[in-house]
Image: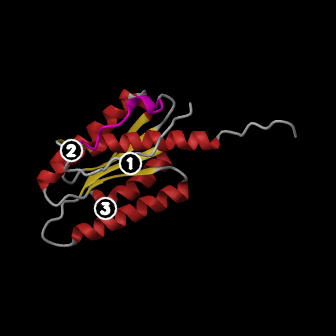
Amino acid sequence: MTTDYRLSTKKMASALKNLSEYDEKNLASAEEMNFSIVVADWNSDITHALYEGAYDTLVKHGAKPENIHTLQVPGSFELPMGARLSIKRDKPDAVICLGCVIKGETSHNEYINSAVSSALMQLSLMTNIPCIFGLLTPNDHQQAKDRAGGKHGNKGVEAAVTAIRMVDLDKEISKPKVKIGY
């Protein structure tokens, strides 16, 4: 299936839009795809809501429950290692990493967020398996709730849609080109 992902010129201000809205008709079927979801336990009221959004979205688009593997890690800092272990154990087509680091009174969030994003990108490039960044980086707990099933949607849904799109893109690019002649 060739999926047409056209660029949108619409503004994307989270204050004005539910970020979890997407065009379901243009999303490939996840029926033949395998996924891992790595979820941090820290801020579990938020991360477990993200997990539900991601899991439900994968199933909604055809992923078989037996092809969705879950791994829980203590906190967001451990997401990259959890993704690496899941890649080794489960051989997924994509790994969805879900966590939440609330800003707080110190700059710990900057170090964690930067380390996690860099490590997930490196892991994606090294393994050729998309490691989806589903890490919320809000200023406070209310902003986290707003993005974990609240007024701005569910970042877990977005992460699942991204995973499906990246697996589909890889399959599309990996198809052999049709040659005519010699």
Name the residue tied to disc 2.
152
Q: Where does residue 53 sit, x and y in percent of width and height?
A: 28, 37
Most foreground residue, 15 or 85: 15
**CA separation, marks 2 and 3?**
24 Å
Query: Which residue is at 47% across, 37% downward?
Result: 34
Chain part drawn in magenta: 17-30
Name the residue tied to disc 3.
77
The residue sitting at the bottom extreme is 107
Q: Are marks 1 and 3 in contact (CB under 8 Å)?
A: no
Query: Which residue is at 47% across, 46% downward?
Result: 89
Disc 2 packing (10 Å; few <14; some 14–19; many ≥20): many
Disc 3 packing (10 Å; few <14; some 14–19; many ≥20): many
Is 57 placed left or right of 62 in the picture? Answer: left
Residue 93 visible somewhere in the drawing: no
Looking at the image, is mark 1 or mark 3 nearer the viewer?
Answer: 1
| Residue type, mark 3 in image | Phe
The answer to whether residue 155 is magenta is no
Name the residue tied to disc 1.
9
2 or 3: tag closer to the N-terminus: 3
Q: Say what secondary structure mark 2 lies in.
A: loop
